[in-house]
Amino acid sequence: MLLLLKRIIAVTLILLITSCGGGGKNSQGADEQGGTVGGVGGTTGLPGKALLGPVIGAAVEVFDITDRDTPLCQATTTTSENLEQAGIINFPECYVQANKLYLVTVSGGFDIDANDDGVLDEEPTPVEGNFHAFITGEQMLEDTWQVTAVSEALFQSVQNLLDLGTSEEEIRQFLEDMVPQLLTEDLNGDGKIDTDDVLQFNPQIHFQSVTQYSEQHLQDVINDIHLAENK
Ligand SMILES: [Ca+2]
Ligand SMILES: [Ca+2]
């Protein structure tokens, strides 16, 4: 039923979308073309984080959304018993275009705070599956960002469109339209609930900011990621 509903929403939105301005706002940091995240020359990009609880030792890849076979950049999340320093995504060097939409995939590793209580779990939980986040080059270059169950739920909502080869503009519009179904609060305080907020979601402090619909759904998403049943 839920899947059917999602498909109906997706099809309706495709029909409704006529155009979309996905342009970059070009604030400080990134120029119009892009910049390098990580590496010696990476002065503008900020690290990401794989965060169910923090996921250590996971493989991270960045893809152009039109070519999900060839990673543009790769990294392994940091390992630490300090939750703040664990699960950090720091690319050796990764050039991204500010206005382009990318897909980040996190695979494997261990969730070291699976119960999200902010305390290192006695036993880490293996992550058998993978999870994703859509992120623009601009978002990657100008703020910290998290790959989480919320970003994965958003990815799953649009996966069919991606597989159908839907245009980047339509995907971006669909993502923005879907966010209010997942989040109820403006997490970065800019007056809008949008994909910027998805990338700031921290399960330990924002779990009350998810919609009633998504609360159980997100727990299911996390369980599926742990057990590799989200494929
Ligand atoms: Ca814990
Ligand atoms: Ca916001």
Image (cartoon, helix red, strand yellow):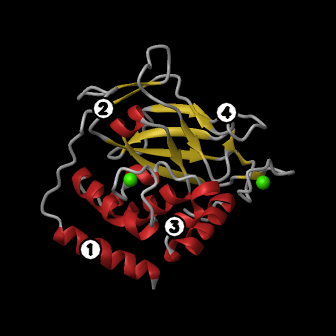
Q: Secondary structure at mark 2?
A: loop
Residue designated by label 3: 210
Horizontal side of residue 177 vs 117, given as left or right: left
Q: Position of residue 166 (x, y in %)?
A: 26, 58
Identify the residue at image location x=34%, y=55%. 191
Direction left: furthest residue: 18
Determine whether the residue tagged by mark 4 lies in a helix, strand or loop. Answer: loop
Ligand 1 - quadrant of the structure image: bottom right
Disc on the earlier residue, 3 or 2? 2
Q: Residue flagged by tag 1: what amino acid is it?
A: Val
Residue 119 image point, x, y percent: 78, 50
Which of 32/118 is in front?
Answer: 118
Q: Please report whichever mark, 1 or 4, sits nearer to the chain's N-terminal start.
A: 1
Q: Work out how far the residue at label 3 is from the one at label 1, CA to CA, in angstroms.
A: 24 Å
Residue mark closest to the camera, 3 vs 2: 3
Q: Is residue 226 visible?
A: yes
Mark 3 or mark 1: which comes first in sequence? Answer: 1
Q: Which residue is mark 4?
A: 78
First of labels 1, 2 by sequence position: 1
**Which residue was labeled with disc 1?**
11
Q: Earlier in the sequence, mark 2 or mark 4?
A: 4
Circle 1 SS class: helix
Residue, disc 2: 97
Tell me the quarter of the picture where residue 216 sits. bottom right
Measure the C-alpha gap from mark 3 to mark 2: 30 Å
Q: Amino acid at mark 3?
A: Val
